[in-house]
Image (tube, rainbow, N blue to C red):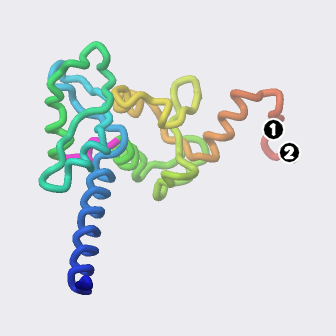
Amino acid sequence: MPVQPVVVAIAILLLGVAVWRLASAWWKYRGRRVITCPENRRPAGVVVDAGHAAATALGSAPELRLSSCSRWPERAGCGQECLSQIAQSPEDCLVRNILTRWYQGKVCACCGRPFGDIEWNGQKPALLRAGKISVEWNQVPADKLYEVLAASLPLCFACHMANTLVREHPELVVDRPAGHS
């Protein structure tokens, strides 16, 4: 007996819904996050096992578990009570979103150019730390993010690259007085 087109359409629709649910759970729970550790009430950097969240998202709410924490391995046996913070507000604790909010309305500390939308796959702005040293976001541990942001200035990508060049290769830099070509 031939398969009815309606059955095929329903199967494709159900498969599409399943794939969408899995992908959206993975997307929602991927990335580094900053939470408040319930044990010591201090920031901790965590990563949710997004693959596990996606794999358990079909029948009900995804099951969350950590794949890493800045307090591990010392506190690896904890009950992961911090997951309730992530479940309650997954976007608010995502490092990428914390940084986006921090740059909003700011201008580059060197050139004064205002920050627009952040390019996550390209020329990301950086942070200007004490001693005029610029650092990229991935160089900042998530559990120290708020502390570093409080002590840093925003720096655009171009100024970050110039700062890095001057710091790492001073022999390539010619410092001319203003007004001279």
Amino acid carrying label 2: it is His
Residue at x 42% of width, y 47% of height: 103
Q: CA distance from mark 1 to mark 2?
A: 6 Å
Q: Based on the displayed image, in which of its 4 quarters is residue 9 positioned?
A: bottom left
Residue 24 percent across, percent down from the top left: 29, 58
> Is residue 162 covered in magenta?
no
| Residue nearest the viewer, comparing 26 with 71 | 26
Helix, strand, or loop for circle 1? loop
Magenta: main secondary structure equals loop
109 over 167 or under it: above or below:
below
In the orientation shown, which residue stands out farthest toward the right? 181
Question: In the rendered picture of this protein, how many numbered marks are placed on residues?
Answer: 2
Report the magenta residues as a range.
89-94
Q: Which quadrant would the N terminus be assigned to in this image?
A: bottom left
Q: Which mark is residue 180?
A: 2
Q: Residue at x 31, y 32 (%)?
A: 67
Q: Is residue 93 magenta?
A: yes
Name the residue: 63% across, 43% down: 159
Q: Secondary structure beneath disc 2?
A: loop
Estimate the x, y position of residue 68 in percent, counting from the top left: 32, 29
Q: Is residue 9 left or right of residue 123?
A: left
* Mark 1 vs 2: CB contact within 8 A: yes
Kind of residue at disc 1: Pro
Residue for badge 1:
177
Figure check: 20 above or below 172: below
